Image: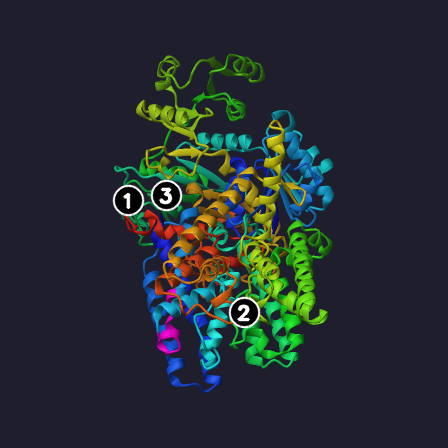
């Protein structure tokens, strides 16, 4: 392991985080807040700067950077960033308990959107801004951002990008990694600006528009209101947000392809078709059920579409307490949590492409059982998928299930009801946000014990970084045997 | 520039690495997905897995808008075909590796009629470089500029050398030859020296001057070696064949040892005035039987690096004056540490050639043409010869008035056939050739050297 290089890059990223904290300080100044809030950010910035400079003090001896170094860097980056990003919550007194603040920050960076806060509205604006801004940073990934602004990238940075960008296989858009990262961020920022303008035009206050746009962009789900998007009672904004949640759940590579003038090519993408098809089917079924049981058709459609796009893109905004919905609708939402968005989007979950590969592999295995001699490759977009990738996806599912089992087991010790225990883990590992029952759309995670919160924190990180990097912190590599 | 490198073998990877480092947008194409993955993981390039003769693959790699396609798959025919296709799709320039001697001497036809801009034969280029070294044996390596007016020679400083523990200024005072020390390599670091840099035993230094001045300088410091007449070549592959031909044309006595009997027969039929021996050249008894001790030079050219190294070390122990080792896996840094002075890698030689071509294309807009480019000391230092266009931005300004980048040295200015070793009062004029040595940065234009 090239620890020096890892800490060197980590140091740079902490400095970057310090720079990003300038924004909440500005918010604090604009809203003439209590000096303590601004100070909480300034103190954190000092800590980040000092720590960053110490880490950067020792120059790396060599430039070799292998896959495990990449995983290690990504795991440490997200842990450090969250651990230090939680400080403003504690120092400003908004969230006095550090474990709670850590949970909230991890939930922000991993774009989960699960909260331990019972009352959101009384918090200082700058804290709310930071809370939503973590979604924006975490959505596309801080390391991708670092790559985009770094003066020069080495080829081996691909290992890092692969560890941070979600999806079973990661490709570049153009031959330069930095250019690829810049394109991704350019698309991301442009879409977010458009969303801010659209929401502002829909009479949402500017501050709320920005925060909501950040949370939508990262597919996070933190809102500045207690009642989430329902609180605005603005059906125009609901529709705009629903559409953008769907858009952010699409593989960003497709936007690049579209911008290059191959829109038809992008629309033929198999994963996109599965994604849109699932949204359509789920929305229709839920709309029908709601129309039959409670609301008029128009309202049912709006509620169903918002909730479905919110859950499948793993955002977690709500416009109604879906916990009171009939069982079929609730079950569909629960299944959508697992499914998640497309690979290469800002969303979480298993990812549509993985599920597509799993379904095709299952079909193939069954066919093979009937006719053992049968040889068949798995195809996505008309191209054969590498068998190694197929095995990788199956293994991914296995690890995913094991992590869920162990987490549920630990959280069960708390003695809550079965449904919240089970769904809290599912919502966290898939980076969705709300669960069901006590921790549903109207509830929050504050009732859980500190141990459970830490377990869920791990689940959120594991879910966002696609499991493997987080296991690095349990490996023998975490402690340098020889710091060289 | 947008460059597609097709075929990720040894040469392909060398080129991909070099071109990506120089900041080009490189797309690496290969049939083997494992190779593509490893290249994409190591260098900042895009990878595409597929057959380069497939139009869709070429289109996906961006051949329509590419500036250069470099084809270096293992098959000459594939390379030629790939270049033709790419050209037809709209690529501006194409470079093909063509190794088969049957094809390579029709490079003019390939260029003028088929439209392949550059045909590279790494084995021939390597043989050419070896023959240049053998013709100037005192140096470990030698590269020439301005049509041979000026040369850069690398010599290894042994303990008894009078240059040891002396500063560059003192050397210049002591030996009044018009030569210039332009790079010092110490273990793995390379330094572009200033006046007070000190030379130590074990360093290898690069010096520039005319052939005659370099020769007399080497005489003065006692590293001069007599002309080489008897050369033993171990390994009769392509390089061996080319080299034997090149050297026998200059009237030297060549003994070529080849292990495969059928190949020996082919060699003896193609080559005149060359003694072809059938035997295992890596066998000590065979070498002794063939009188290794009385040879002036040994060139180890078998297909296996380890055997080349061991044969070379044996030759050193027998006090053969000049030993040249071919090493394909040039990335191992220990090779110079274990005492091999002259190491040749066909990939690096061909790599330099292609890089030079690419850079020349790149700066054709500001007209400071690159005439030659050499990678010295294992690729860590570059020596570049520019021809200065008239109306050059820094024309006629004395160097002391200009701010030059660090790690860079203007070695010589060639004006109307005469050589100037520049000082602070010298200046550049249009029509000059300027030779610049640099470490750590790649020059594409003469403007790059000034701040």
Residue B205 image label: 3
Q: Residue at x 54, y 17 (%)?
A: B267
A419 or B430, nearer to the observer: A419
Q: Chain of mark 2?
A: A
Viewer-nearest of discs 2 and 1: 2
Q: Is residue A234 left or right of residue A398?
A: right
Q: Residue at x 37, y 12 (%)?
A: B289
Q: Chain of mark 3?
A: B
The residue most toward the bottom is A32
A247 or A363, nearer to the observer: A363
Q: Is residue B387 magenta?
A: no
Residue at mark 2 to residue at mark 1: CA–CA distance: 63 Å
Q: Dot 1: what SS?
A: loop
Q: Chain of mark 1?
A: B
Q: Dot 3: what SS?
A: strand
Q: What residue range appears in magenta?
A: A83-96
Rendered view: A152 above or below B51: below
Percent coordinates x, y for residue B429 in the rendering: 55, 57
Q: Dot 2: what SS?
A: helix
The answer to whether residue B351 of the structure is visible from this angle is no
Report if the CB atoms under discs 3 and 1 are less than 8 Å apart.
no
Residue that label 2 marks: A215
Percent coordinates x, y for residue A279 in the rendering: 65, 59
Rendered view: A52 above or below A66: below
Q: Is residue A49 left or right of residue B48?
A: left
Percent coordinates x, y for residue A90 in the rendering: 36, 74
* Residues indicated by labels 2 and 1 sit on the same polypeptide chain: no
Residue at mark 2 to residue at mark 3: CA–CA distance: 61 Å
């Amino acid at each position: 392991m090239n620890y020096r290089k890892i800490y060197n890059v980590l140091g740079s990223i902490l400095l970057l985080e310090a720079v990003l904290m300038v924004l909440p300080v500005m918010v604090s100044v604009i809203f003439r807040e209590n000096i303590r809030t601004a100070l909480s950010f300034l103190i954190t910035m000092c800590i980040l700067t000092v720590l960053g400079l110490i880490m950067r003090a020792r120059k790396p001896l060599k430039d070799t950077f292998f896959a495990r170094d990449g995983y290690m860097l990504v795991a440490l980056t997200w842990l450090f960033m969250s651990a230090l990003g939680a400080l403003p919550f504690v120092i400003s007194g908004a969230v006095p308990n550090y474990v709670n603040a850590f949970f909230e920050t991890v939930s922000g960076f991993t774009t989960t959107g699960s909260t331990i806060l019972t009352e959101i509205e009384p918090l200082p604006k700058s804290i709310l801004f930071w809370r939503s801004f973590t979604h924006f940073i975490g959505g596309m990934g801080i390391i991708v951002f670092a790559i985009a602004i770094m003066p020069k990238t080495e080829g081996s940075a691909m290992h890092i990008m692969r560890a941070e960008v979600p999806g079973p296989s990661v490709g570049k858009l153009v031959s330069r990694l930095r250019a690829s990262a810049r394109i991704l961020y350019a698309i991301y920022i442009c879409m977010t600006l458009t969303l801010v303008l659209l929401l502002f035009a829909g009479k949402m206050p500017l501050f709320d528009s920005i925060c909501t746009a950040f949370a939508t962009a990262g597919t996070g789900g933190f809102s500045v209101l207690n009642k989430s998007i329902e609180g605005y009672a603005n059906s125009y904004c609901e529709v705009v947000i629903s559409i953008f949640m769907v858009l952010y759940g699409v593989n960003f590579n497709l936007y690049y392809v579209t911008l290059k003038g191959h829109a038809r090519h992008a629309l033929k993408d198999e994963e996109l078709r599965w994604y849109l098809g699932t949204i359509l089917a789920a929305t229709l079924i839920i709309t029908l059920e709601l129309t039959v049981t409670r609301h008029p058709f128009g309202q049912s459609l709006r509620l169903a579409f918002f909730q479905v796009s919110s859950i499948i893109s793993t955002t977690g905004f709500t416009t109604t307490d879906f916990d009171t919905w009939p069982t079929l609708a609730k079950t569909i939402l629960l299944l959508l949590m697992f499914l998640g968005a497309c690979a290469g989007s800002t969303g979480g979950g298993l990812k549509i492409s993985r599920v597509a590969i799993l379904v095709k592999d299952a079909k193939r295995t069954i066919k093979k059982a009937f006719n053992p001699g049968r040889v068949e490759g798995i195809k996505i977009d008309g191209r054969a998928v590498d068998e190694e990738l197929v095995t990788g996806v199956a293994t991914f599912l296995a690890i995913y299930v094991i992590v869920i089992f162990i987490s549920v087991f630990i959280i069960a010790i708390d003695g809550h009801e079965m449904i919240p225990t089970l769904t809290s883990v599912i919502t966290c590992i898939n980076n969705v946000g709300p669960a069901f029952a006590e921790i549903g759309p109207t509830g929050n995670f504050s009732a859980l014990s500190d141990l459970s919160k830490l377990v869920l924190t791990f689940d959120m990180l594991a879910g966002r970084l696609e499991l493997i990097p987080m296991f690095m912190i349990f490996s023998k590599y975490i402690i340098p045997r020889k710091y060289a | 520039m947008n460059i597609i490198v097709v075929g990720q073998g040894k040469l392909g990877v060398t080129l991909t690495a070099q071109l990506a480092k120089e900041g080009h947008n490189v797309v690496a194409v290969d049939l083997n997905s494992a190779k593509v993955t490893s290249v994409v993981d190591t260098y900042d390039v895009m990878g595409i897995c597929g057959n380069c003769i497939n139009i869709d693959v070429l289109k996906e790699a961006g051949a329509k808008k590419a500036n250069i396609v470099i084809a270096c798959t293992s098959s000459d025919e594939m390379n030629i075909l790939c270049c033709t296709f790419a050209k037809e799709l709209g690529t501006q320039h194409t470079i093909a590796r063509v190794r088969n001697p049957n094809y390579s001497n029709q490079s003019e036809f390939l260029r003028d009629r088929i439209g392949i801009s550059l045909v590279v034969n790494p084995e021939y280029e390597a043989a050419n470089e070896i023959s240049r070294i053998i013709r100037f044996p005192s140096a470990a390596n030698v590269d020439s500029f301005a049509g041979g007016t000026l040369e850069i020679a690398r010599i290894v400083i042994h303990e008894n050398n009078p240059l040891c523990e002396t500063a560059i200024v003192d050397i210049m005072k002591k030996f009044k030859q018009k030569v210039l020390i332009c790079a010092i390599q110490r273990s793995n670091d390379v330094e572009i020296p200033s006046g007070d840099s000190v030379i130590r035993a074990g360093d290898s230094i690069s010096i520039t001057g005319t052939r005659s001045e370099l020769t007399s300088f080497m005489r003065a410091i006692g590293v001069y070696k007599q002309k080489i007449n008897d050369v033993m070549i171990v390994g009769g592959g392509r390089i061996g064949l080319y080299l034997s031909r090149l050297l026998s044309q200059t009237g030297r006595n060549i003994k070529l040892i080849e292990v495969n009997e059928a190949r020996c027969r082919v060699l003896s039929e193609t080559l005149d005035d060359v003694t072809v021996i059938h035997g295992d050249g890596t066998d000590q008894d065979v070498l002794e039987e063939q009188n290794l001790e009385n040879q002036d030079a040994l060139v180890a050219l078998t297909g296996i690096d380890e055997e080349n190294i061991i044969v070379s070390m044996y030759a050193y122990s027998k006090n053969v004056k000049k030993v040249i080792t071919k090493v394909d896996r040039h990335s191992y840094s220990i090779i110079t540490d274990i005492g091999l002075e002259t190491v040749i890698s066909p990939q690096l030689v061909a790599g330099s050639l292609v890089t030079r071509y690419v850079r020349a294309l790149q700066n054709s807009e500001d007209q400071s043409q690159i005439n030659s480019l050499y990678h010295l000391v294992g690729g860590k230092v570059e020596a570049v010869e520019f021809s200065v266009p008239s109306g050059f931005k820094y024309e006629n300004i004395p160097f002391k008035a200009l701010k030059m980048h660090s790690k860079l040295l203007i070695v010589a200015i060639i004006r109307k056939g005469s050589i100037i070793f520049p000082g602070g009062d010298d200046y550049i004029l249009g029509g000059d050739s300027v030779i610049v040595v640099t470490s750590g940065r790649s020059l594409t234009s003469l403007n790059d050297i000034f701040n």
